Image: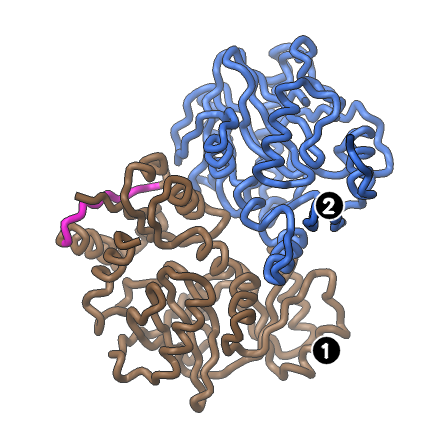
Chain colours: A brown, B blue
Amino acid sequence: MSRLGIFVDRKTLSNSEQLSALIHCRDVAEGMGHNVEFLFPVDINKIPKMDALFIRARTDPMNITYVAARMADFHGIPVIDDSDSIQICGDKINMYSHLMKKNVSLPQTVFLSKNDLSVERVSELFDRMGTPLIVKEPSTSFSLRVEKVNDIAAFFRVARRFIKMSDWIVVQQYVESTYDWRVGVLGGRLLYACKYTIPSVTFKIQASVNGHIVYCGVESVPETAVPPHVIQLGIDAADAVGNGLYGVDIKNNNGDACVIEVNDNPSLESGEDTCYPHVYEQIIDHLFAA
Amino acid sequence: MNDRKGYTSQTDGGLQTESPIVAGPANPFSRPGMNRRAKIRETILAETHVRMETGGNHAHAHLVPKKEPVMTRDSLALVMRDHACHVIAEDYSYKTEAYYTILEHEQAGENICPSSRDVLDAFVVPICLERAKLTGIPVMEWGISQAYVPLPAILYGLNYFATASDFFVVQDNEQAKDVVKHITNKGKYPFCYQKLDDGATIHTCTAVFGQTVGSCTAVREFAEKIYELFSIPLVSMVFVKSANGIVLSSLAPTRYTHLTQKERALLAAYREDQEFL
């Protein structure tokens, strides 16, 4: 019997949906004949005893999930998310660099070093990419440090805040849409697809509006109802990052699709996989086949 | 080596280098969120220092007179040596100018040292120790905890705001409670602990391209192996010395201004691509 470790932390278990998804994952794995153990950060030294590791916690190269992924690497244990994917997807500069290198379709994107932050440079970016612009702190997740700016003064207000957290920031052309496609990809193949409907009060999938957190709507969509070029773009973007599990966000305006980002450790607790009942089986198969 | 614990003189074992002695944990790198917590940290540190100093010899800060550094604060240098481009920087941490410079060269397919993987590994303490251990470098035993600390111990934060430059030596439960509260941001994050043997002392030593100035053979060998493993031109090594020998505790960034005159000269020689025989 193979041992599967599911790496979690306290913050992963912050609501009932997340807990239900983890229990469902464990039940599926046990149904496939594996022994499953939930591993918390204090259990990190148990990783070498596992046959595969599935990380279900917010990943970042600076937190304990990266330690878990590297521990798996050191001991030759297959892992999702692997440390390369965490390093690339955790940093939008790194992630967009990989996508650009493979000519994956993106909104116009520029990296700005704190040393390049000048009125002339910012003014040139507005001229080139239009108004508004999107400014992103590279390690943002859940749209937390993503801002839309309409003029140079607003740009500097946001950029100065982000530069405190990162020496480089991302500046991107704004692409308007009412929903994003989320294409789930595993090992270079479509795993699931859904739509994230953006709340009318914001341009982000999650935002704080008047002190209240506003979440996007999630609608699982069967493969046959997803435009083929969106699926292909999702697969191409995921391939530019690695061979693991990714959730690719895509805007598809008038058939002109572009990738907004590639996420490692994509959410699976909000109904993303409703039309795809075998998502966990495929993930577990992929892990043990590695 | 620099006596970080403060209460044990280390002249007998030949461990000392001419590096400035730093009186307790100090982080030369301002990281996001650190300013607002500086007061809490200062309180903890002040208390830690008092306890250290009552144990014996007082630590002396900056014995070496300040001289013009070989490189200015936050500056980077790219040096071509052995068919590779070496990035010299004070701080290689994630999302710094140095980190993105490395990433840019990697994306261009160039041979760059250190790699972005190396710098991430080197400055996250458990990863650094695990990787070093696998190549035969003696390292401290470590564990991850959310609250429990075996005493006495060295503690390192494990989160976005932590750097290996910040380590804390805790001797009793009261002190441990305060430090854990600080480094976990009131229990939000886990931390790394390393149990200290009785009589163990903590030392730091700076390595410039894997070379040290005035250190003992054991430390010199550590520096060479660590450079072979991580290829970081400028790094501060933290060691623990006990009856069982010397072991690696962590690697941390180094400020140019903290280099001794001889270390600055060594760095300048590497920058100018001098031959070392």
**Residue A107: quarter of image:** bottom right
How far across and down, in percent of the image, does residue A19 sit?
A: 25, 54
What segment is highlighted magenta in the picture? A32-40
Q: Chain of mark 2?
A: B
The residue that mark 1 highlights is A123
- The answer to which of A191 and B4 lies nearer the viewer is A191
Magenta span has A9? no
Any part of residue B188 in sight:
no
At mark 1, the secondary structure is helix
In the displayed structure, does residue A192 sit left or right of residue B126?
left
In the displayed structure, does residue B205 sit left or right of residue A22?
right
List the single residue furthest toward the bottom: A254
Instruction: Tell me: residue B250, above or below residue A129.
Output: above
Query: Which label is found at residue B178?
Result: none
Neighbor class of circle 2 (other Cα within 10 Å; few <14, some 14-19, many 20+) is few
Using the rendered image, report if marks 1 and 2 lie on a common chain.
Answer: no
Neighbor class of circle 1 (other Cα within 10 Å; few <14, some 14-19, many 20+) is few
Q: Amino acid at mark 1?
A: Ser
How far across and down, in percent of the image, does residue B270 sit?
A: 78, 39
Query: Which label is found at residue B81?
Result: 2
Magenta span has A37? yes
Specify the quadrant that holds the C terminus of chain B: top right
Instruction: Tell me: residue A72, above or below residue A115.
Output: above
The residue positioned 65% from the left and 11% from the top of the image is B13
In the displayed structure, does residue B96 sit left or right of residue A145?
right
